[in-house]
Image: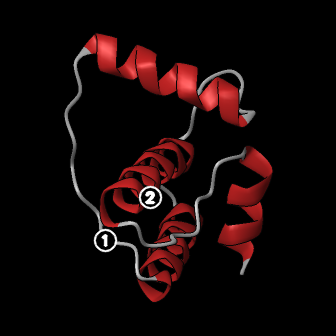
Amino acid sequence: MSSYDNVRQQKVSDRRKESGYQTKRLYFFAKDLDRIKKIAEEMGYDGKLSDEEYSAVVRSCIAARYSKNTNKTVEEIDTKDKQYTYTLK
C-alpha cells in the first residue's frame, strides 16, 4: 500500500470516527445477503454494494424495527438518496 493510500485510509477512518461510527464485524448466511440486496434494490441501490451501502441498509432495517417496537419516531434512511444526504451532514 502506498503512502497516499495510507493517508487516504486514515482520513476515511478519522471521518468515520468523528461521525460516531463504530466498526463491528457481522456474519450473514447467503440467503440473508440476498434479502439485504433485495431491500437495497427497493431503496434504490443497484449493482454491487459497498460496505457503507450495506451499513445504510442495515441501519434502515434497525431504525424501522426499533421504531415499530418502541413506538418512538426514528429518522429512517430508507432510500439511496437519503443515505447520501445523511452521510454528508
Seen in the picture, residue 20 relative to 39 is either above or below; the reply is below
Give the labeled residue for mark 2.
63
Seen in the picture, residue 26 relative to 88 is either above or below; the reply is above
Give the quadrant of residue 68. bottom left
Q: Position of residue 34 (x, y in %)?
A: 43, 14
Q: How is colour applied across the structure in the image?
A: secondary structure
What residue lies at 54% left-to-right and 61% top-to-bottom?
5
Q: Type of residue at label 2?
A: Ala
Q: Position of residue 35 (x, y in %)?
A: 43, 19
Give the labeled residue for mark 1.
22
Q: Type of residue at label 1?
A: Gln
Q: Is residue 39 left or right of residue 17?
A: right
Work out which residue is located at the far bottom of the displayed protein and give it. Answer: 18
Please tell me whether mark 2 sits on a helix, a strand or a loop.
Answer: helix
Q: Is residue 56 left or right of residue 86?
A: left
Mark in front: 1 vs 2: 2
What residue lies at 47% left-to-right and 88% top-to-bottom?
18
Seen in the picture, residue 85 relative to 15 is either above or below; the reply is above
Between 59 and 75, the one nearer to me in the picture:
75
Please tell me whether mark 1 sits on a helix, a strand or a loop.
Answer: loop
Between 1 and 29, the one nearer to me in the picture:
29
Q: Is residue 38 left or right of residue 46?
A: left
Q: Position of residue 47 (x, y in %)?
A: 68, 21
What residue lies at 73% left-to-right and 74% top-to-bottom?
88
Q: Are marks 1 and 2 in contact (CB under 8 Å)?
A: no
Give the quadrant of residue 66. bottom left
